[in-house]
Amino acid sequence: MSCEVVKVVDVAAPFITELKDQISKLEVKPLLVAFLANDDPAAKKYAEWTAKTCADTGLRFELRECARTELEDKIVEANEDDKVNGIMVYYPVFGGTQDGYIQNTVSYRKDVEGLCHKYIYSMYHNIRYLDDAQTEKCILPCTPLAMVKILEHVGVYNKVLAYGNRLHGRTITIINRSEVVGRPLAALLANDGAKVYSVDVDGIMELHRGQGLKLKKHEVFETKVTLDEALKVSDVVITGVPSPNYKVDSSKLKDGVVAVNFSTAKNFNDDIKEKASIYVPSVGKVTVAMLERNLLRLHEYQTKEKL
Amino acid sequence: MSCEVVKVVDVAAPFITELKDQISKLEVKPLLVAFLANDDPAAKKYAEWTAKTCADTGLRFELRECARTELEDKIVEANEDDKVNGIMVYYPVFGGTQDGYIQNTVSYRKDVEGLCHKYIYSMYHNIRYLDDAQTEKCILPCTPLAMVKILEHVGVYNKVLAYGNRLHGRTITIINRSEVVGRPLAALLANDGAKVYSVDVDGIMELHRGQGLKLKKHEVFETKVTLDEALKVSDVVITGVPSPNYKVDSSKLKDGVVAVNFSTAKNFNDDIKEKASIYVPSVGKVTVAMLERNLLRLHEYQTKEKL
């Protein structure tokens, strides 16, 4: 079979090398504080994994466990503490819109996950810098950013095209439209020039910058295109359905498709290798590298601010 | 029966008189723009009602209907339009966390509903002014603010006490913990000194500022107190369960309780009049008056800014 199965460690490797190099030059290593305020064993495991990765690359990591009713005050404390460079939270805490409130309580100067409104708004509106002088890039949410890096690695981004337009001509289906990954990812890829079908149980949205990328940022429409029709024309299919029972039918995909799964479950069957040109079975390790990259960036902004 | 059934028009009346007086002095009447991006007939009805109330008090009201996929761009347009003084949205649009994103897209300078993070955060943290010089009060969400005005009207707020502490000694149960009404309301009343039981299907939270109001803002705890226990000791019971089948059992209430229902359904049985000292069957008209009051306040800030 000619399918290239991409090991995500290979995508993460150059970023980790660069991170280690940057960190080695810093006298005081940046500190990431992570809040665990739920009983989810998966969150705890993810926390242990983040701790290990941070130790490997030379960053300081501190897990703070607390009752969910105390979380907000603890975040405000960390916002105001100069010794803390980055803050993250293991969700869900309360679930639903109250978690959205918590996301916005993290100061944008320390928001390594890129989930506060300032960053999310900038991302949707294709605003790439925090300042007019373009000295500070906006922080992007980790998993969507990891996906961009993966799609760059596997050649879906076309470097011949101008930066910002490198997905022009690509059609991408994303099966997941959560506020944390699927919807921001769809916007990000559409802003880079792709035609995106964003799929969830409620229906399909189409996002694009119009013919010839005439728009500066994407538009979004409710489309009547079905999932089968979308899959048939998609150069890239990205899945993130958190259920072991959900599988994409490989026979419905375009021959030579790029298939990427970011769900903890496997959303593609093994026969994907007979259809895809490139298959990326998981993205987690790139996500953590992007988390660290965001931390270093915020640390840099904070250091500049103190000068 | 000695129960006083409070007509909400009587609570709203002095506010409306004051609003009309203020508006009559303005050459250009403030403009409220409301966005309707769903097919909910209840939202449409509420929009018509808001239009009528605005016309009565002398405010300009414009309903803008659009597809939900266009809503964000239309809000940004209104944010940037100097002729628009206030913006509101009929929710739900997408539902869930995506609606939280929309709420934060409305500029805080025009957010008559007080739902953006800046205002919600200030409310939870008992921060009452936007600026250190205390020239601009924060906008409070309309229904919780209406509830404060109703509780002032019926004497639950004790004017003998210092402003900010006027609920000291009161125990209040609120059955509803939505992000739009129940949870902010619980925080608001606890910040004013009450001991609050905040009830929803997931359990009961207790909010208070500690013995002798030693804290500047409320703390929150998951409590083991049951609903029956909470009702038995509550001076005020406020309900907002959007189901005609949900009824509070009057026999479980304290004799002489103050009962307030903000649900569109009736959460109290008729026998409430045999138990309560004061019964407020609905709050909608005060809510709209508060919406108009917020608009005038924002209009005043905007005018000041232009000077």
Image (spheres, coloured by chain):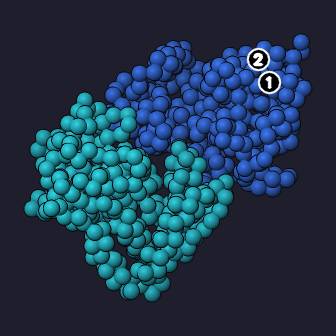
Chain colours: A blue, B cyan
Classify residue B222 as left or right of residue A144.
left
- Residue displayed at 66% across by 37% down: A201
Q: Nearer the viewer, residue B90 or A183?
A: B90
Q: Are marks 1 and 2 in contact (CB under 8 Å)?
A: yes
Farthest top residue? A1
Q: Nearer the viewer, residue A32 or B83?
A: B83
Image quadrant in which the N terminus of chain B is located: bottom left
Classify residue A236 as left or right of residue B40.
right
Query: Which chain is home to disc 1?
Result: A
- Residue displayed at 30% across by 60% down: B281
* Percent position of residue B68, x then y: 64, 55
The secondary structure type at the circle numbered 2 is loop
Image quadrant in which the C terminus of chain B is located: bottom left
Name the residue that disc number 2 marks. Answer: A269
- Mark 2, other Cα within 10 Å: few <14 / some 14–19 / many ≥20: few
Query: Which chain is home to disc 2?
Result: A
* Percent position of residue B218, x then y: 25, 44
Q: Is residue B190 above or below residue B202?
A: below
Q: Is residue A196 above or below residue A259?
A: below
Amino acid on which the number 2 mark rests in the picture:
Asn
Q: Nearer the viewer, residue A271 or B120?
A: A271
* Percent position of residue A75, x then y: 38, 36
The secondary structure type at the circle numbered 1 is loop
- Mark 1, other Cα within 10 Å: few <14 / some 14–19 / many ≥20: some
Classify residue B80 as left or right of residue A266.
left
- Residue displayed at 72% across by 35% down: A174
Amino acid on which the number 1 mark rests in the picture:
Asp
- Residue displayed at 61% across by 58% down: B39
Name the residue that disc number 1 marks. Answer: A249
* Percent position of residue B275, x then y: 17, 53
Sequence-first disc among 1 and 2: 1
